[in-house]
């Protein structure tokens, strides 16, 4: 079996962000465990090495066709049919011309994300509609709507407002073109069925590598130990730190929950992530027992040393890869219910909504009052890569 992945977003190598991790490891495990090969079309990124080709046989990369004139770009954002995200990431189609004649060689073509709508329009006349799958990682117009409220700057609010206004029409119309839809989020399956009641919609959890035996460099541990080693309990939050939902979560926990935990336990709060916003930097500045580590090469040392990972996100969109990574490491986790819905773990992982209850759950976990073997065993049952590969194979070939 041979698959073509149509991926409209820049994908990092090695994969670090949620989108890249999902796209890479799905093809990686399909190849490793089922012998299914994948090719991929995506925007050009630097440094695709041998690791990348463990997942993909061929990679077709296209330059981003960005409008250099700022005023024209703003005009397009407001008046063109394309959403702002696509205007900033639109691929130059000239690289796809040679691919069109070979589309018949693929058993299945997977269109990732709602932002692939414009690529679908380019390829629609050259593909067998029976052999296409829409793979949803978010209901993007609903996510954009949430981000309008969460964003602090007027520029960001305007960006997400324009995204939302266009996507609320484009995304449902695009989803209705498919008869087979896969979602990484259990929570969003019913929403997708409501949008397209003629399609078969499947929940297929993302696949992740096994982390629990991952080697960590001693020098990385030593550097971290020097800063936080004196604390009995180390609480970790990870995420892209210029994203409004992560900013809100880190600051809410740091301001509202962490002081309640400190009244009872000698603990520190460690925030780790890419591109921290001014708000995050100002919050951490001169805060006792709160540490910020930005743009780190690997999260492994932080997971190794942490006693608890918190995921206090209030946006239920998609699935929270930081949650799954922590559980793959067999770390103890406390989250909000919204953070667990997409993963189907709302009845498995300890969760709370109010600051006092969240703090109590954290203290109970740190004091060993919750048996986490039950949590880990249920997580490993649901997120077993072999089981997910077999189910994915059924969906792709049915």
Image (cartoon, helix red, strand yellow):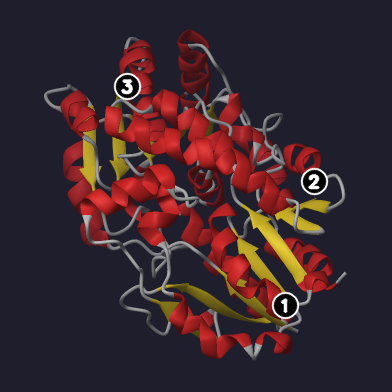
**Inter-mark Cα distance, 1 to 2:** 21 Å
The image quadrant that residue 22 belongs to is: bottom right
Q: Residue at x 44, y 31 (%)?
A: 147
Horizontal relation, residue 359 to residue 233: left or right: right
- Residue on which disc 2 sits: 196
Do we see residue 288 in this rendering? yes
Dot 1 or dot 3, earlier in sequence: 1
**Inter-mark Cα distance, 1 to 3:** 51 Å
Question: Which quadrant: the N terminus?
Answer: bottom right
Label 2, residues with CA under 10 Å away: few <14, some 14-19, many ≥20: many
**Inter-mark Cα distance, 2 to 3:** 41 Å
> Looking at the picture, how far across and down is residue 136, in whole percent?
64, 52
Dot 2 or dot 3, earlier in sequence: 2
The image quadrant that residue 43 belongs to is: bottom left
- Residue on which disc 1 sits: 127
Q: Residue at x 32, y 13 (%)?
A: 259
- Residue on which disc 3 sits: 254
Foreground mark, 1 or 3, reads 1
> Looking at the picture, how far across and down is residue 122, in whole percent?
59, 72
Horizontal relation, residue 315 to residue 67: left or right: right
What is the secondary structure assignment of the residue under circle 2? Answer: loop
> Looking at the picture, how far across and down is residue 127, in whole percent?
72, 77
Label 1, residues with CA under 10 Å away: few <14, some 14-19, many ≥20: some
> Looking at the picture, how far across and down is residue 70, in whole percent?
22, 52
Q: Residue at x 87, y 50 (%)?
A: 198
Horizontal relation, residue 247 to residue 196: left or right: left
- Contact between labelled residues 3 and 2, with CB atoms less than 8 Å apart: no
What is the secondary structure assignment of the residue under circle 3? Answer: helix
320 or 347, nearer to the observer: 320
């Amino acid at each position: 079996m041979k698959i073509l992945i149509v991926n409209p977003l820049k994908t990092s190598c090695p994969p670090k962000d949620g989108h890249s991790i999902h796209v890479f490891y799905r093809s990686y495990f399909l190849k490793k465990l089922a012998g299914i090969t994948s090719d991929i079309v995506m925007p050009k990124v630097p440094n695709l090495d041998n690791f990348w080709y463990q997942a993909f046989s061929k990679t077709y990369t296209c330059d981003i066709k960005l409008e250099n004139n700022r005023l024209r770009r703003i005009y397009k954002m407001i008046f063109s049919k394309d959403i702002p995200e696509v205007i900033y990431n639109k691929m130059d189609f000239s690289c796809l011309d040679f691919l069109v004649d070979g589309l018949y060689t693929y058993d299945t073509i997977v269109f990732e994300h709602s932002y692939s709508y414009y690529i679908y329009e380019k390829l629609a006349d050259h593909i067998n509609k029976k052999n296409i799958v829409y793979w949803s990682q978010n209901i993007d117009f609903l996510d954009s709507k949430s981000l309008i409220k969460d964003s602090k700057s007027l520029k960001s609010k305007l960006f997400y407002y324009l995204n939302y206004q266009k996507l609320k029409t484009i995304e449902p119309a695009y989803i209705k073109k498919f008869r087979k839809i896969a979602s990484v989020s259990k929570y969003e399956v019913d929403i997708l069925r409501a949008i397209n009641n003629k399609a078969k919609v499947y929940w297929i959890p993302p696949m992740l590598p096994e982390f629990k035996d991952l080697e960590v460099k001693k020098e990385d541990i030593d550097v971290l130990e020097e800063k936080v080693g004196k604390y009995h309990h180390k609480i970790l939050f990870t995420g892209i730190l210029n994203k409004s939902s992560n900013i809100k979560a880190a600051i809410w926990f740091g301001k509202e929950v962490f002081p309640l935990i400190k009244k009872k336990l000698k603990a520190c709060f460690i925030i780790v992530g890419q591109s921290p916003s001014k708000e995050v930097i100002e919050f951490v500045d001169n805060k006792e027992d709160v540490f910020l580590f930005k743009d780190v090469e690997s999260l492994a040392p932080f997971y190794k040393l942490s006693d608890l990972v918190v995921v206090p996100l209030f946006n239920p969109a998609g699935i929270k890869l930081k949650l799954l990574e922590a559980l793959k490491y067999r770390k103890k986790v406390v989250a909000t219910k919204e953070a667990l819905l997409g993963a189907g773990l709302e009845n498995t992982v300890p969760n709370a909504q109010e600051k006092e209850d969240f703090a109590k759950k954290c203290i109970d976990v740190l004091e060993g009052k919750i048996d986490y073997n039950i949590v880990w065993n249920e997580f490993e049952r649901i997120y077993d890569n072999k089981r997910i590969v077999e189910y994915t194979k059924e969906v792709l070939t049915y």
